Amino acid sequence: MIKTPLIELRGVKKHYVLKKSMLEKLAGGREQVVKAVDGVDLQIFNGETLGLVGESGCGKSTLGRTILQLHPPSAGEIIFDGKPIHGLKREERRDFCRQAQIIFQNPYSSLNPRKSVRQILALALQARGLSDPNVQEEEIRLLLPRVGLSEAHIDRYPHQFSGGQRQRIGIARALALKPRFVVADEPVSALDVSVQAQIINLLEELQAEFELTYLFVAHDLSVIHHISDRVAVMYLGKIVEIAETEKLFNDPRHPYTQALLSAIPRVDKEARRNRILLTGTVPTPIDPPAGCAFHPRCFRRKGRVCEEQPPDLAYDSSQHGVACYACQS
Amino acid sequence: MLAIERLTMIYETKRGRVKAVNKVDLSLGKGEILGLVGESGCGKSATLLTILGLVSYPGKVTGGRIIFRGEDLLQKTPAALRKIRGKEIAMIFQDPMTTLNPVFKVGDQIRESLQIHGLLNEQAEGGRFKGRKRKESEMDRVYQLMREVGIPSPEKRYFEYPFQFSGGMQQRAIIAIALACSAQLLLADEPTTALDVTIQAQILELLAKINRERETAMILVTHNLAMAAEFCQRIAVMYAGEIVEQGSTDEVLEKPQHPYTQGLLRSIPRIGKVKQKLEPIPGTVPDLAALDGTCPFYPRCAQARPACLEDERSLEDVGGGHWVKCALYS
């Protein structure tokens, strides 16, 4: 695999300003900001699957959506295929939107219940510039078997499908645009175990067939381990560790990653190791702790330095990046 | 302590009878933790609701017995059941936010359980407390419970409302309610599904501690095989309302006998194993209203054979307390 970045993020931030009530406005005081994504540098290489893990509220979904421009970033730069998205002209921007697609988490709310499969997919094809109904029909009939649905499903509505089948429709919709980059935002977490495996396999097959690049967002570490080439761990809006999958799972360096990995329940008996129990919960991103955001829960805290200056993501020779003072010597 | 025999619960629907719980046999000893695993709609939660007598129309228990400490719960009057519920058998639900009442203080909700079952009144030294004295003693007990489940500064948190609690803290409060009357049997319905991995580990550790210290027996319902593997001594696998395999955790997970259990184990990604393609179970879970008494797994089974279409299958012992319901073994 030639390692050329398809997507590059430079210092991407996404902050949301909280609305104040009239009373709070009168009382004055400073604005409250939710720092959902707070300075992320990241490269996603052509043809790879980058897994993004973290607990709820850590900003992983927001990051995925920010890359797709579903919400514009508050700061930083996103470069797609060598060009900064920010400066794209209207036409080029449309083309970017076609090439970068998303598969949503909840197959029950991401499909319009009033539209048949044909209508759902036709709309996507329309966006690709195929407006002739006959051509659309033909494309849809090619697409459905590809995602494991049959042509007989074409005029059915979402409620007639099971969760797994709906997720297949969502995947077909993303594929209809011939994307190069797909954000899979928790695509299997709403599904049952046996169906989950079907969808994971489907995503892997499609990746090989269409040379897709995935950003795979999930909280289930076993799924991430299975599907990803590289894994990035997020905590409170920042990437704290990033490495190739095996490296990260065998040699986690950041204390948060260590705790996260040790917390996964394992089926295999020999795999159950000493558990690192973290105390407390993820702090709110409204007023994240100063310095390293993890320091209040950290068991390897080094003292003052952790509380004052947030650590930078530092890479070693094997491209294993860690943002932690205790790991950098 | 708990023995369930051929328990059947159906939902009477327009499309026919849905057998949500179909001839389920389970038993549980004191201090034992049993895991009930399976996919959604397989009847895990319905089984728990039936044990507690919480099945309401259109659900109906049509057969079987639930023997709890020598008495059949199905024969009890609603009033008698109410005395047992919350006091001797407690339940933890999946979603902590919907379990707690949003308009009452968390502390008062924990205290309510003590009030209803009149526990403090009976235990109080030197006769009965009345009025404020009683409330104070109850509150002291609530503080103690909150401390026990790991809620910090209970004197402050008592007066907070559920929305001020994080998901993990809410679940701890619910566990405190379950503990309030020292229940001997705790039914936990996906207690950590709504929580993050690190919080999940904290809650499981708390439940394990309760089990160790109080010898509380538990039934843990989960779809997460790995969680059941770590937490439970025995596992029962459910499929389409039936228990298809049951045995000690190690037996079931290392020597799965039923094709469904085998398929389930092959379809989950595992960390630390050499990566290979997952083998999903083909097809989907059957429509429970359309079951005809033959093996519900037959259409998806790779080892299906004519014998599978016979009406009656029973749990067969394949050795070492390991039971399987499959034509392959009868």
Image: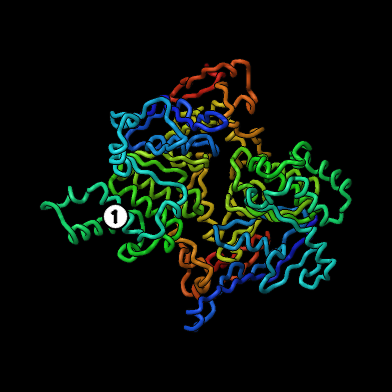
Residue A306 seen from this side: no
Rendered view: A238 above or below B288? below
Q: How many marks?
A: 1
| In this picture, residue B222 sits left or right of residue A317 | left
> Which residue lies at the image location 46% right of the left edge and 47% below the top edge?
B94
Q: Nearer the viewer, residue B155 or B329?
A: B155
x and y percentages locating residue A294 in the rendered image: 51, 66
Element type where label 1 sits in the image: helix
Q: Position of residue B7 (x, y in %)?
A: 42, 27
Q: Is residue A180 left or right of residue B307?
A: right
Q: Chain of mark 1?
A: B
Q: How is the image coloured?
A: rainbow
Residue of label 1:
B111
Relative depth, front residue between B1 and B51: B51
Residue at figure coordinates x 65%, y 57% from the top left: A243
| Quadrant of res B107 | bottom left
Q: Where A303 falls versus A129 (above or below)?
A: below
Can the viewer see residue B277 in this picture?
A: yes
Q: Residue furthest front?
A: B14
Which residue: 80% across, 58% down?
A98
Going by the numbered disc 1, the residue's amino acid type is Arg
The spot of residue A101 in percent (x, y) is 74, 56
Q: Residues within 10 Å of mark 1 (few under 14, many from 20)?
A: many
Q: Position of residue A289 (x, y in %)?
A: 50, 71
Question: Which residue sits furthest left?
Answer: B126
Q: Where is the C terminus of chain A found, in terms of image quarters?
A: bottom right
In-front residue for pair B181/B257: B181
Residue found at x 28% / y 28%: B70
